[in-house]
Image: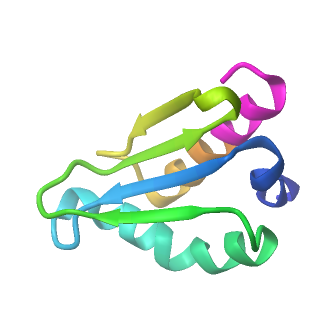
Amino acid sequence: MAWRSQLSRNLKELRILLCQTSPSSAPARLFVENNYKDLKTLNPKFPILIRECSGIEPQMWARYDMGVERGIRLEGFTEPQILKALQDLVKAGASGKA
């Protein structure tokens, strides 16, 4: 999973929006619990923002060069699917197709 260390090269910022209590955000909360430490260790100066808001639909937003942003709705995703979505966002930044 070498792509994990590429976050800071291919993205400018990563934001994860989720609800603290809703069942639809449970996989996103699990993703944060299981992956945040590893991602932050591999990309210590890279901004990974976790935004919690009651009742919000889980989402992941990547910001690239020139202020370009891509968002993915995470409702119905499992934790592995969220990880794959993040990998796709990183790859999009590497290929310049953001």
Q: Is residue 65 magenta?
A: no
For the C terminus, the image quarter is: top right
The span picked out in magenta is 88-98
Does residue 69 sit above or below 38 in this rendering?
A: above
Quadrant assignment, res 22: bottom left
Quadrant assignment, res 34: bottom right
* Residue drawn where x is 66% and y is 27% of the image: 66
Q: Is residue 95 magenta?
A: yes
For the N terminus, the image quarter is: bottom right
Taking the image as shown, residue 24 lies to the left or right of residue 38, namely left
User: Going by the picture, which residue comes out furthest to the front?
Assistant: 66
Does residue 43 sit above or below 67 in this rendering?
A: below
* Residue drawn where x is 69% and y is 73% of the image: 40
How many numbered discs, if any? 0
Does residue 28 sit above or below 60 in this rendering?
A: below
Q: Residue 93: horizontal and vertical position, in percent? A: 74, 33
Q: Give the overall secondary structure of the magenta segment.
A: helix
* Residue drawn where x is 60% and y is 47% of the image: 86
Taking the image as shown, residue 45 lies to the left or right of residue 27, namely right
Q: How is the image coloured?
A: rainbow
Q: Residue 54: horizontal and vertical position, in percent? A: 13, 64
Seen from the viewer's position, the closer of residues 73 and 44 is: 44
User: Going by the picture, which residue comes out furthest to the left?
Assistant: 55
Quadrant assignment, res 71: top left
Seen from the viewer's position, the closer of residues 27 and 63 is: 63
Taking the image as shown, residue 45 lies to the left or right of residue 30, namely right
* Residue drawn where x is 31% and y is 45% of the image: 76
Seen from the viewer's position, the closer of residues 89 and 8 is: 8
Q: Residue 97: horizontal and vertical position, in percent? A: 72, 19
User: Going by the picture, which residue comes out furthest to the top?
Assistant: 97
